Image (cartoon, rainbow, N blue to C red):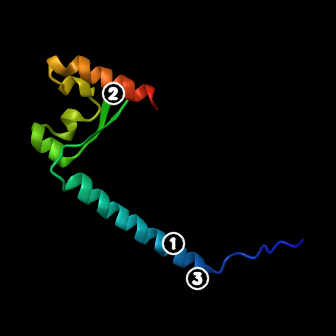
Amino acid sequence: MTVDLQPYPSSAISESVKLAQEKLLKSREKYSTIVEKGNDGIVILEGGAIRFANSRMHILTGLSDEETIGKAFIEFVSEQFRPMVSKCTRKEQLER
């Protein structure tokens, strides 16, 4: 059995790269529409800390990235809801 080890033609590689770049651009546009242009405040948590907050979240809370990123999410939850939120986030972490 012989294996052809000739590389792909550079034109095929260039076309593949171009298609991948186009897909990435479309993906970024979708992200921007969903996350940054929506009416909902969105945060991404990692280990209970805020890693990302969209611009709508900043408008709703009046807080900047510097005031939120890296802080424990629970700090921003009303005292009366902290037990419920803690329970939900623990459950979420256990299910991963």
The mark closer to the camera, 1 or 2, is 2
Q: Give 4 or 70, whichever is nearer the viewer.
A: 4
Who comes first in sequence, dot 1 or dot 2? 1
SS at circle 1? helix
SS at circle 3? helix
Residue 87 against residue 53 in the figure, above or below: above
Q: From mark 3 to mark 1, how far is it between C-alphas?
A: 10 Å
Three-letter residue code for mark 1: Val
Three-letter residue code for mark 2: Gly
Q: Residue 63 carries which label?
A: none
The residue carrying mark 3 is 11
Q: Which mark is residue 48?
A: 2
- Tell me if label 1 and label 2 are in contact, CB under 8 Å: no
Who comes first in sequence, dot 3 or dot 2? 3
Three-letter residue code for mark 3: Ser
Q: From mark 3 to mark 2, how far is it between C-alphas?
A: 47 Å
User: Residue at the location (25% across, 28% down)?
Assistant: 73
Instruction: Judge from the rendering whether residue 92 lies leftward or rightward of residue 19; answer left or right.
Output: left
Q: Which part of the image, by quadrant, shows the N terminus?
A: bottom right
Within 10 Å of disc 3 (Cα), the crowding (few <14, some 14-19, many 20+) is few
Q: From mark 1 to mark 2, how far is it between C-alphas?
A: 37 Å
Residue 13 locus on image (x, y percent): 58, 75
The residue carrying mark 1 is 17
SS at circle 2? loop
